[in-house]
């Protein structure tokens, strides 16, 4: 079972460059989300989606765009990378909303992004 | 805005002993959900336990149990009979309307 797949695992960008972090799940999950994890800050929600065609902002959405054209994919776009976006990024999905019984979040293995 | 506070950045416990991790949260809502997630060195996040706010009964999962105090907005995690495999970062999380907000985490060390 692939679960939640994030690519790439590591990425180095220069300030001002753009890139897309990929996230795909093969569990037919409706809910998907992106978090960033920084030392001493825990996980902070960037964007989330409750289904194809629907996205919403989390706690720290500035500098990031998302789209959800299919159930399986939820890419995160950095339009103009900044050093403050250096972080580990996690994609997560769940069958229904995460609060539903037996619908825990499934996390990918993370993408470590460095912006110089 | 909802916030989740974990006041203990690090804790240590002797193997086979019991440890309690603290979590408080701030909300004006009456209906919400709370979670504890575990992140071992592999970085994979694992759901430990889940609590519905409308349930007064504390959730339990094997060696893991919570003390949910709704009026005090407190949600602590008790780990009984601690094992070496319990060593990890533990995150408390709050969910209302599909936004899951995490605390900053508590790193738990298990001493053999």
Image (cartoon, coloured by chain):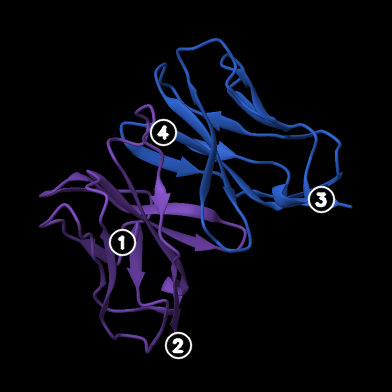
Chain colours: A purple, B blue
> Seen from this angle, which residue lies furthest top?
B56
Q: Residue furthest front?
A: A1
Helix, strand or loop status at disc 2: loop
Q: Position of residue B107 (x, y in %)?
A: 71, 52
| Quarter containing the C terminus of chain A | bottom left
Badge 1 element:
loop
Q: Pointer 3: what residue?
A: B110
Chain identifier of the residue bearing label 4 in the image: B
The picture quadrant where one finds residue B66 is top right
> Which quadrant of the figure has residue B62?
top right
Binning the other alpha carbons within 10 Å of mark 4 as few (below 14), some (14 to 19) or many (20 upward) gives: some
Q: Residue at x 30, y 67 (%)?
A: A63
Say which chain tag 3 marks.
Answer: B
C-alpha span from label 3 to label 4: 29 Å
Residue B109 tag number: none
Image point (10%, 57%), residue name: A69
Mark 1: give few (<14), some (14-19) or many (20+) Cα within 10 Å: few
Subunit bearing disc 1: A
- At x 26%, y 62%, the residue is A24
- Pick whichever, B19 or A113, lies toward us: B19
Residues tagged by mark 2 and mark 4 found on one chain of the structure: no
Calculate the distance from the C-alpha at mark 2 to the C-alpha at mark 4. 34 Å
Q: Which residue is mark 1?
A: A62
* Mark 4, residue position: B95
Query: Disc 3 vs disc 4: Cβ atoms closer than 8 Å?
Result: no
Does B76 appear above or below B57? Answer: below
Residue A43 in view here: yes
């Amino acid at each position: 079972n692939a679960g939640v797949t994030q690519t790439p695992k590591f990425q180095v960008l220069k300030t001002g460059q753009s890139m897309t972090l990929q996230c795909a799940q093969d569990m037919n999950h409706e809910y998907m989300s992106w978090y960033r994890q920084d030392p001493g800050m825990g996980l902070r929600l960037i964007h989330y989606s409750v289904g194809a065609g629907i996205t919403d902002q989390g706690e720290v959405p500035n500098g990031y765009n998302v789209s959800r054209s299919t159930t399986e994919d939820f890419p995160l776009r950095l339009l103009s990378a900044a050093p403050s976006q250096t972080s580990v990024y996690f994609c997560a999905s769940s069958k229904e909303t995460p609060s539903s019984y037996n619908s825990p979040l499934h996390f990918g293995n993370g993408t470590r992004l460095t912006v110089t | 805005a909802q916030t989740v506070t974990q006041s203990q950045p690090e804790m240590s416990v002797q193997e086979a002993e019991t440890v309690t991790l603290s979590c408080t949260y701030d909300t004006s809502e009456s209906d919400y959900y709370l979670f504890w997630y575990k992140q071992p060195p592999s970085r994979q996040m694992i759901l430990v336990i889940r609590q519905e706010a409308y349930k007064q009964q504390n959730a339990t999962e094997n060696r893991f149990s919570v003390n949910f105090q709704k009026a005090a907005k407190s949600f602590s995690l008790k780990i009984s009979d601690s094992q070496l495999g319990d060593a990890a970062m533990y995150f408390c999380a709050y969910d209302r309307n599909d936004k899951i907000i995490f605390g900053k985490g508590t790193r738990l060390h298990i001493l053999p």
